[in-house]
Amino acid sequence: MLAVRNLAVRYGPIQAVRDLTLEVRPGEIVALIGANGAGKTSAVKAIAGLLPHTGTVSLGGQPLPRRAEYALRAGLALVPEGRGILGQMTVAENLRMGGYARRDRAGLEAAMEEQMRRFPILEQRRDKLAGLLSGGEQQMLAIGRALLSQPRLLVLDEPSLGLAPIMAARIFALVEELRATGVAILLVEQKARQVLKIADRAYVLETGTLRASGTASELAARGLLADAFLGTVTQAPPPA
Ligand SMILES: Nc1ncnc2c1ncn2[C@@H]1O[C@H](COP(=O)(O)OP(=O)(O)OP(=O)(O)O)[C@@H](O)[C@H]1O
Ligand SMILES: [Mg+2]
């Protein structure tokens, strides 16, 4: 499904990601875990074609073009860190944007209704400004929007960030439900313990470098290792 080889991202003198190799197989939830500043967002933005990088990224055996709109057409949808919801537009307008690359009008309308059914709160608020939704509801909107492009791979960048624990748990449960629909998932998270409960496999990034990888149960069992890399994790402030 997704194969990333020797990915590197730098911002001038700052090397944010170095030599990252990872894969996501069909039907998997794969977690990319790391503390603040570990390079998680840089890695997934590069994978989605949003950042200059070196190394190769392929989806379904085909090299992924290095532009976001092409990556989207190839079947990769990114739910960005901070959700990327346009607060001054309605819920329905935000949702519809996820289908901008689709040519099938009827299919788009049907997909809109499907996401409204999946997230009843979006149906209830469909003509309200998206900025009035709670953080968790905005996350659902962002996920629904991403699903409108019918991705083969859904990439979620810290979907639980800034959410109350009960809402974070709902988002994790939702991600598990989505795997059952057949979409492969790359899930970026700092909350290692929680994410290892739903992930099949995980990669641990530390200051831009891969420090560990394996099945979620192996990594959870290597608790000492997880503590060594994740013990200093602090909660980032919610995005402004
Ligand atoms: N636009 C930028 N310009 C310069 N440096 C950047 C930029 N974006 C990120 N960095 C740096 O790159 C490194 C990795 O940042 P990145 O945002 O990828 O980490 P992250 O793991 O997503 O962190 P967080 O958990 O806080 O979201 C950090 O040192 C960060 O300061
Ligand atoms: Mg980040």
Image (cartoon, rainbow, N blue to C red):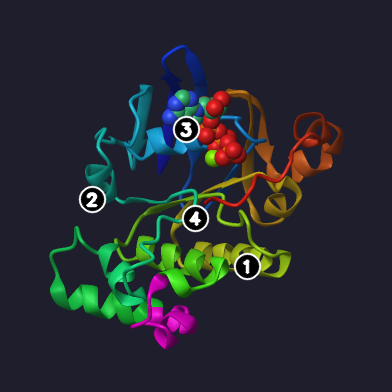
The residue closer to the viewer here, 45 or 61, is 45
Q: Is residue 159 left or right of residue 130?
A: right
Question: Residue 164, located in which quarter of the rendered image?
Answer: bottom right
Of labels 2 and 3, earlier in sequence is: 3
Query: Ligand 1: does it lie within 8 Å of the C-beta at label 3?
Result: yes
The amino acid type of the residue labelled 4 equals: Gly
Q: Please indicate, yes or no, whether residue 210 appears anywhere in the rendered image.
A: yes
Badge 2 local density, few (<14 within 10 Å), some, or many (20+)? Answer: some
Which numbered circle lies on residue 73? 2
Between label 2 and label 3, give the one nearer the viewer.
Answer: 3
Residue 142 spot, x, y in % from top left: 43, 63
Magenta-drawn stretch, dominant element (helix, strand or loop): helix
The amino acid type of the residue labelled 2 equals: Arg
Helix, strand or loop at disc 1?
A: helix
The residue closer to the viewer here, 152 or 155, is 155
Q: Vertical placement of 77 versus 176: above or below? A: above
Q: Quadrant of the N terminus?
A: top left
How much space separates mark 2 and mark 3, taking CA atoms? Answer: 20 Å
In this view, the residue farthest toward the top is 13
Of labels 2 and 1, earlier in sequence is: 2
How much space separates mark 1 and mark 3, taking CA atoms? Answer: 24 Å
Q: Which residue is mark 3?
A: 43
Question: Residue 94, located in which quarter of the rendered image?
Answer: bottom left
Q: Which residue is mark 4?
A: 27
Residue 85 spot, x, y in % from top left: 40, 61
- Name which residue lies at 26% across and 32% down: 66
Which numbered circle lies on residue 173? 1
The residue closer to the viewer here, 182 or 164, is 164
Of labels 4 and 3, earlier in sequence is: 4
